[in-house]
Amino acid sequence: MKLLTHNLLSSHVRGVGPRGFPLRLQATEVRINPVEFNPDFVARMIPKVEWAALLEAADTLHLVEVPKGPIEGYEHDEKFLRQMHHVLLEVRTGPSLASLATAG
Amino acid sequence: MDSNHQSNYKLNKTEKKFLRKQIKARHTLLRHEGIETVSYATQSLVVANGGLGNSVSRSQLLPALEKCGLVDALLMPPNKPYSFVRYRTADEAKKAYITLNGKEIVDDLGQKIILYLNFVEKAQWKELGLQALPPGLMVVEEIISSEDEKMLLESVNWTEDMDNQNVQKSLKHRRVKHFGYEFHYENNNVDKDKPLPGGLPDIWDSILEKWLKEGLIKHKPDQLTVNQYEPGHGIPAHIDTHSAFEDEIVSLSLGSEIVMDFKHPDGVTVPVMLPRRSLLVMTGESRYLWTHGITPRKFDTVQASKGHKSGIITSDVGDLTLSKRGIRTSFTLRKVRQTPCNCSYPVVCDSQMKATPPSFPGSAREASQLEQEYVHRVYEEIAGHFSSTRHTPWPRVVDFLKALPSGSLVADVGCGNGKYLGINKELYMIGYDRSQNLVDICRERHFQAVIGDALAVPLRSGSCDACISIAVIHHFSTAERRVAALRELVRLLRPGGTALIYVWAMEQEYNKKKSKYLRENRISQGKEEISSGAVVPESLTEQVPDVGNQDAAGCVAAITDLQEGGGHASTVTKAKLPVHTNRTSFHSQDLLVPWHHHGKPGKDKAVGAAGPRDPGPVFHRYYHVFCEGELEAACQTLGHVRLLQSYYDQGNWSINNNKAKPEKLQMPTAVE
């Protein structure tokens, strides 16, 4: 699962966090899968990111070079976009998160 | 390849080409498997193109590797086109890297394969815990001598009662023959009032007496089914019908060994090796609760070490290899039940379930149970076959997705096999499905997919630019739940976002035109059943597609109910759910639709009129088919929703909704 997907997920399972969000990650199940860089696409994803959850995830997974938040004029900042591209779309977590509890 | 990487002599054409391929292999591994290669020498190498998944066996690969040095371990993960090898020293690994890169070997199918090696930091594979045989299962080895095996195989006359056509057609599927009682695949049962003349062949008398005396079996069987499997044949996972046969079911495997998969309803799968001339005994839980099946393929993954014979194939990738299948003939002996089944597994028991036939649910709990049994469980079972019949995306859904702006976030609720997840690469799509197996299929196709329930989608509110829910909401068994599913879709949308919803229509004929579902009614000859995703009825005539007065009244009631705020469900009579005949028009809004499961679906698509029956289990799926206007009425009960479009598309009702921005008024739109 890409970190962007993880960031968008919320869970109705009790005990997962305030407002049921975010989900716990495990550092042992990380992989990097290269994805072609598309700056426009990444720029459009930025407004959807929940930064607190993203930073917590990045911390758990020991990721480096993760921007702390959107910067002024990020749409044209290639360095920022490339970093976000890597974090959101290339970092993959293990399949265990695919199993979420369902509504009763 | 030159061992001195530092030399700056020019690479010739062949070497350049080889280098390109090596780099490509490296990228493929990285991209698809998350295997990171390193450019410095280590003890471990990944051997791309040399795996069980591309027909390279341990006996071919290991000798080649051992020539370069002392091999600590060779890990061959099942179904993967690569393996890992760990040498005692990095120098030995380096030698292998130089010598074996680009080396040609011959695989199990006789084809030439080129190996590509790359260094990895660690040769690792997650190993699953030890498994036990399903309770009540036993495999007795060498129960029959080679002479008796030969005699039994020769005793079966396959060509009697079959004309030329049928002999030819039977090559597509496994061959079957019955003694004692005929087994009927339409209802997976025997006709107890019509035993076959002759009973079991005489040769079985002495064999069965022997087994009874030795305590291997407790009852004398009176029904025999002979199955012949050529390599590539299989049988879909199933439980032998409870009401048809007593507890003990035994199966003798002759001619070839095979791997049979046992699956528990919780999802645990146990692959069991059945050696040649062994007797499989299924009793208790393994007979009543676990399904058993044989995957249609030409090779099985088996234990490499000689000590193992029968028993579970473990997941120890250090000890797996491929075994080419031969022709296996199984003799399955069973005792026909004369009384209803009273086992301890009522949920999967047809006798005990018949006592309480599925009916229209009167409460949320009943609705949930109905859906669990007649939607979720079924999709888990048929996922593979289902996926193979769902490959053509519907054009108007494609149009909807392609019209969305680049960078849109789209949720596909009830994504199935991910048919729509890759349609528009400019979108970020996340698929949700209730079925683990279907989500697994999506993930195999490298889509973002998560297990989730349409009534509580694990996705942040207001995050989606668009949602689609194609052929999903009609599986909810009460109006409240259907509306709740629609409400969830709206919750996911940001203000201004759009949702596209498709549901099966009650009216399969619209504007005097029949839908594809009705039109693709392949006429069958006589009693033969056509195998396809949805099965053709046995009658030659099409039923008149007339929505009778009773049904129309039902539709009106459904819509009025929604408009009046629901709550009508509890006063609807607890009518039994009718079983629909596929490819005919609907006569009830709430029904069970059969799915005929096939293990090897691809081959069945083009079967003509006189094709042979492929024996397989029947599953019933619950549907609530929608009347004209019903879907719209349901959406109108939601707040902040504006109807953009409403149309009929090939037997489905569809609406396109827009989540209103807070300051906008709701405005109804004309129906197309």
Image (cartoon, helix red, strand yellow):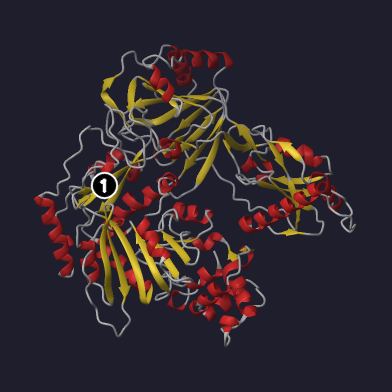
Residue B238 lies, with reference to residue B9, above or below; the image says above
Looking at the picture, how far across and down is residue B591, in whole percent?
Answer: 23, 49
Residue B577 can be seen in this image: yes
Q: Secondary structure at mark 1?
A: strand
- Residue pictured at 44% horizontal, 74% vertical: A20
Read off the chain for label 1.
B
Locate the C terminus of chain B by quadrant. Answer: bottom left
| Residue named by callout 1 | B592
Residue B272 lies, with reference to residue B177, above or below; the image says below
Looking at the picture, how far across and down is residue B62, in whole percent?
Answer: 75, 39
Locate residue B275: give its quadrant: top right
Is B370 left, or right, of B305 in this rendering? left
- Residue pictured at 57% horizontal, 68% vertical: A89
- Residue pictured at 19% horizontal, 53% vertical: B511
| Type of amino acid under label 1 | Leu
Residue B23 lies, with reference to residue B389, above or below; the image says below
Q: Nearest the camera: B261 or B605? A: B605
Q: Nearest the camera: B1 or B460? A: B1
| Neighbourhood count class around disc 1 (C-alpha, 10 Å): few under 14, some 14–19, many 20 upward | many
